[in-house]
Amino acid sequence: MTKYNQTFKQQVVDFYFQHEESLSLTCRTFTVSKRTLRRWIAQYQHSGIKGLAVLHTKRTYTPEFKYHVIQTVQNRDMTVEQAYLYFGIANPSTIHQWLKSFQQCGIEGLHPKPKGRPAMKKPRYAKMPPPPKTEEERLRLRILELETENAYLKKCQQLDREKMRKKPTPSKN
């Protein structure tokens, strides 16, 4: 949600022009920063009332577009403030972020980055063997199950016996 709607911005800009373009008076009257007011005035002078419109959709820019804007600024064809108005970008700080990313990572820095927490990998579970097709396969599988169960029970009995041996016997005094 935006802090200021279009009608408020229009009132502030109109007040500014009606009072002999007094930046300080306008800022005090409406309690907005000078930077914000200058941006609104520049948007209004460049695009009229449409420049003050509140965009309710998040705008995404292609890496090619970002690169074009950066090249325009770096070649000294335009300043950042002129470029954001010319290209219709919401805020000059967006261009500053692109410049910083471009200087740090090159063209790769202009590509969108994944947001949020990465998805967890799905755990791998042991696959169940396919159901037996013949009676012989079914019987072999049953024998294997019984042998496994038998080995497990034998191991449990062995551990119980070892536990009993290690247990100290109470002395008779």
Image (cartoon, grey):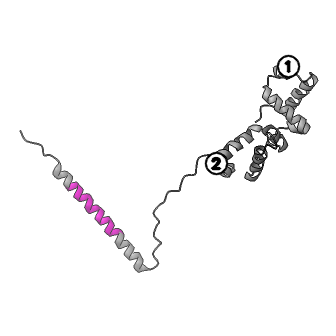
Residue 7 appears at what percent x and percent y?
87, 31
Residue 87 appears at what percent x and percent y?
82, 45
In the rendered image, which quarter is residue 29 located in?
top right
Three-letter amino acid code of the residue under disc 2: Cys
Relative placement, left or right, of 58 versus 53 is left
Question: Looking at the image, can residue 105 be seen?
Answer: yes
Q: Quick one: label 1, few (<14), some, or many (20+) residues within 10 Å?
A: some
Element type at mark 1: helix
Element type at mark 2: helix
Relative placement, left or right, of 60 versus 166 is right
Q: Is residue 153 magenta?
A: yes
View extreme (front): residue:
75
Three-letter amino acid code of the residue under disc 1: Leu
Q: Which mark is residue 105?
A: 2
- Circles 2 and 1: CB atoms closer than 8 Å: no
Q: Residue at coordinates 71% horizontally, 44% vertically from top-left?
A: 98
View extreme (left): residue:
173
**Helix, strand or loop for the magenta stretch, by majority:** helix
User: Is 156 located above or below residue 128 in the figure?
Assistant: above
Q: Quick one: label 2, few (<14), some, or many (20+) residues within 10 Å?
A: few
Q: Residue at coordinates 22% horizontally, 59% vertically from top-left?
A: 158
Q: Front-most of 29 and 124? A: 29
Q: Which image quarter holds the N terminus? A: top right
Q: What range is drawn magenta here? A: 145-161
Which residue bears the numbered disc 1? 25
Q: Front-most of 13 and 21? A: 21
In the rendered image, which quarter is residue 11 located in?
top right
Q: Residue at coordinates 68% horizontally, 51% vertically from top-left?
A: 107
Counting residues from the start of the chain, the first of labels 2 and 1 encountered is 1
Question: Looking at the image, can residue 49 be seen?
Answer: no
Residue 114 appears at what percent x and percent y?
64, 49
